[in-house]
Amino acid sequence: MSDPHDHKHAPEPEDNRPLEDAGTQALSEALASSFKLVKVIMILLVLVFLGSGVREVGSYERAIKLQFGKPVGTGDAALLSSGWHWAWPYPINEIVKIPIGQVQEVTSSIGWYGQTKEQAAAGIEPPMRATLDPSVDGFLLTGDGNIMHSRVTLRYRITDAVGYAFDFSNASNQVKNVVNNSLNFATARFKVDDAVRKEVTAFKDEVRREIDRLLVAENIPVVIENLEINSIPPRQVKDAFDAVLGAEAIRSKTINDADGEANRVVALAAGEAQGIIDSAHADASRLTNSVAADARYFQDQLKYYRENPPLVINRLQAEYLGRIMTNVNTKIVQIQPGKDNRHEMRLLLSREPEKSESANP
């Protein structure tokens, strides 16, 4: 009997080998296809990775390329102009855009009553509460101990892109803080009536001067383009302010009317006074000229008088009587008699009037 352990394994049937070869070949082909797909995906990923570093800088923007967090270049050389730029993707490189050519805008965050951005944009006034709520409503304390609301809108341009982007953690918030501090500073130096109505321009100028001073003191590289300020009294006492404004308008109108009437009376009196003065000057000049003419006339007659005094006296007397009695119908001249010659003249007064030739018989 033969030992079973000495028995050799019988060879596998040759019909199974073609099946194994076909499976291996299929697996190889599948792996090869997978490798090709992986290569394509890897290539696409590399292209996407490299393409993600392409950035466009707008016409009103400048950009700074950072390499591991530090600017590449210094000063103006670090600024990228408008157009397309490429950099290694983050975290190797990073392109930071700065709107240096655009006008930036910040609005004060203090001093105004509670109002959402949506309400402010739509011009909708929120419901007015009976009193101010400090947790919601902002207000400012004026120099005379009153309160008011004020909102400042500042528009500015960036002058140094590198300093604006890297010298401050948030330059826009820093500018807003400057606006808030300047608003508080100016409000404390004005009375509420002056800031709200009487000296609005002076109040605005004071706010701008303080903003300029703080921007220079804190080395914030911006320049102011426009400043708008809207200041109002608290809405809860608006009617009282309107009543005061109406009373002041009536007062101003009354004063203006009184000033106008006073000016009219003064001008009229001045005209009359000037007329009297001019008339007096004219009379004085006329009298002076008349006296001067008479003096010259008598001076001229003096030589004739010295030659024949009675003749000159009689001539002058007749001349002046004729001038005086121009409209007298009847003239009776009594010549003064000499020392030894006496004359007597009798006059019949209240004589009958002469009959008119045109009267009816």
Image (spheres, helix red, strand yellow):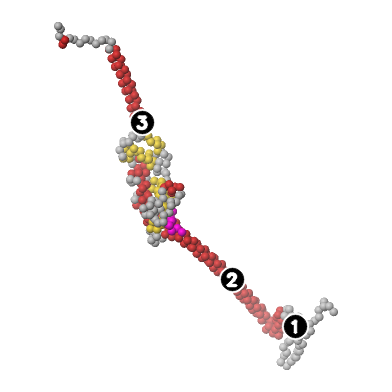
Residue 293's spot in the image, x, y percent? 65, 76
Residue 251's spot in the image, x, y percent? 50, 64
Q: Give the total of numbered labels.
A: 3
Q: Residues within 10 Å of mark 2 (few under 14, many from 20)?
A: few
Q: Secondary structure at mark 1?
A: loop
Q: Secondary structure at mark 3?
A: helix
Residue 344 relative to residue 190: left or right:
right
Label 1 or label 2, whichever comes before in sequence order: 2
Q: Which residue is mark 2?
A: 272
Q: Residues within 10 Å of mark 1 (few under 14, many from 20)?
A: few
Above or below residue 327? Residue 256 is above
Mark 3–mark 2 CB contact (< 8 Å):
no
Q: Which residue is mark 3?
A: 48
Q: Nearer the viewer, mark 3 or mark 1?
A: 3
Above or below residue 154? Residue 295 is below
Is residue 233 magenta-colored?
yes
Question: Gap between marks 3 and 1, in whole Å?
Answer: 139 Å
Residue 70 placement: quadrant: top left
